[in-house]
Amino acid sequence: MILVNALIKPIYLFGIDRNIQLIVGTEAYGNYVNILNFTFILQFISDFGLQNYMSRFVSQDSTNAKNTYSKILSFKLILSIVYFLLTLFLAWIWYGEEFNIRFVAHVCLNQIFVSSIFFIRANISGLGLYKTDSFISVLDRLYLIVLGGIFILSPALKSNVTINFFVWIQTVSLFLCFLTGLIVLMSHHFKFNIIKVSKSDLIKILTASLPFAMIYLTSAVFYKSDNIWLVKLLPDGKLQSGIFAASLRLYEAMSMISLAFGSLLLAMFSRSFMDKNILHNLLKTSVSILLIISILLAFSGYFYSMEINSMLYHNGDPYWVRILSIMMLCFIPGSINYIFSSYLQAIHREKLLLRIYFILALLSILLNLIFVPILKAEGSAWVFFIVQLLLFVIQIFFIRSELNFGFNSIMRQLVFISTAFFLYFVIAKYCHFAIFYKLSLSAALIFLMAFITGIARITEFKKFLALKKW
């Protein structure tokens, strides 16, 4: 799963998505991301927490899941229609004279496909089909790489590449991925009968999924609203949105691994809910593994941000580099947050998570209103960092007992992180050879330090792998 996500999605982000930005221009791409994130935030209406609800429900009661699926499917179709119409209405109010109904409607359609695919994947992972879920999680990107690559790499076809073209190939790719997921569920005897949902069933589904829906909305506000505020608050907002999106692209590429961890662990946490020993060991081991990966990726991006920015965007502007550096440091708490959030949802503490997300969503809006007019895209980067760090600290506080965070454990973590930072600094500044060799040497030393400090233990890793047999 990690290998697939580490290969396919970054290839899409840097081979297709990045080239689209270079071809159409930073400002045009920034406007697209602005619309995309606007529709993404409102997607909680279409999903309404059904993805996480079904993932946990199927994990804990796979026998009745097949019958429940048909009831929820009817509900989801209604929600998708409501989402589509309401998003168009709100976009008309928000964007005013710049509102392009055809473009917004097309992006909304893609978001409905995305939500539907996530819903299908929730059922697949809930059945314990983790490899199949991992494959479907990258299938739409695989289609996009093939379709987009044909046009981008062909001199005769490259002139046809526009933002509208990009949205269309996403539609085709998502539709093909959607069909594949349906076929998988049908092979496991899931029925797709659209049946009338009784009032009692509707209330039951709404009550169970509402906390997940609100979690989605509030988290989307502080994860995806930065570009929207840049366009709304600045005269050159579309350009600033494109600049911020360029740095966020690397963050999202690295997040593919942590997001895959979080999605998979939500089902695994749910399946081991009744066995606290397995549950807590799974949590601690997964955090340790992801911490090592996060340190490697974040420090690599931070210490070589100038080289990375020049390579990706042919731009050595210190302004772009500062934004990228901030986003790279943000990745350490941000990646671990995926695991903590999945854990809190799996153990039925979604109300606590919702309160945390609600406060952080309000804080994110307030900080954007303060920092964006002054620092522009760099202000958005600082807001993103502050919110992710606060989320990390707050979640640590509430699950500290499960992590068994004593004084010795905290000291090991601090020694590991500070030593890793020092090693990266020394190698980046004083070792005069190619970046590839610098990164390889840094990675080798970090893994060595992880075992020396006790962050990584072979016995715990074996237990983690053994869970796939459970």
Image (cartoon, rainbow, N blue to C red):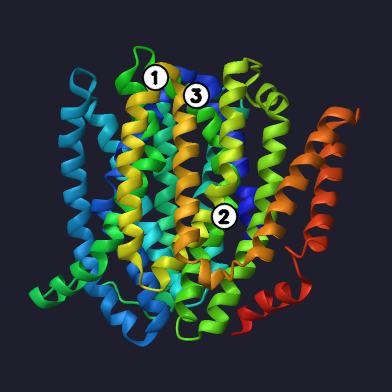
**33 and 365: which is toward the camera:** 365
- Looking at the rendered structure, which numbered label has been put on residue 153? none
Give the residue type at disc 1: Lys
Which three-letter amino acid code belongs to the residue tagged 3?
A: Glu
Circles 3 and 1 in contact, beta carbons < 8 Å: no
Would residue 55 appear left or right of 307 to someone viewing this image?
A: left
Q: Is residue 394 above or below residue 111?
A: below
Of callouts 3 and 1, the N-terminal one: 1
The quadrant of the rendering that contains the N terminus is bottom right
Residue sitting at the far right: 432
In space, the residues marked 3 and 1 are separated at their CA atoms by: 14 Å
- The residue at the point 65 percent across, 25 percent down is 309
- Foreground mark, 2 or 1, reads 2
Picture layout, residue 175 above or below residue 439: below
Residue holding disc 3: 378
Residue pointed to by mark 2: 258
Q: What residue do we see at 66% from left, 75% from top? A: 464
- For disc 1, the neighbor class at 10 Å (few under 14, some 14 to 19, many from 20) is many
Residue identified by numbered label 1: 238
Q: Residue furthest left?
A: 199
Label 2 sits on a secondary structure element that is helix
The span from disc 2 to disc 3 (Cα, nearest Å) is 24 Å
Residue 47 visible, this angle: no
Say above or below: 114 vs 248. Answer: below
Residue 424's spot in the image, x, y percent?
Answer: 79, 39
Residue 75: quadrant of the picture: bottom left
- Name the one closer to the observer, 221 or 70: 221
In percent of width and height, residue 383 lies at 44, 33
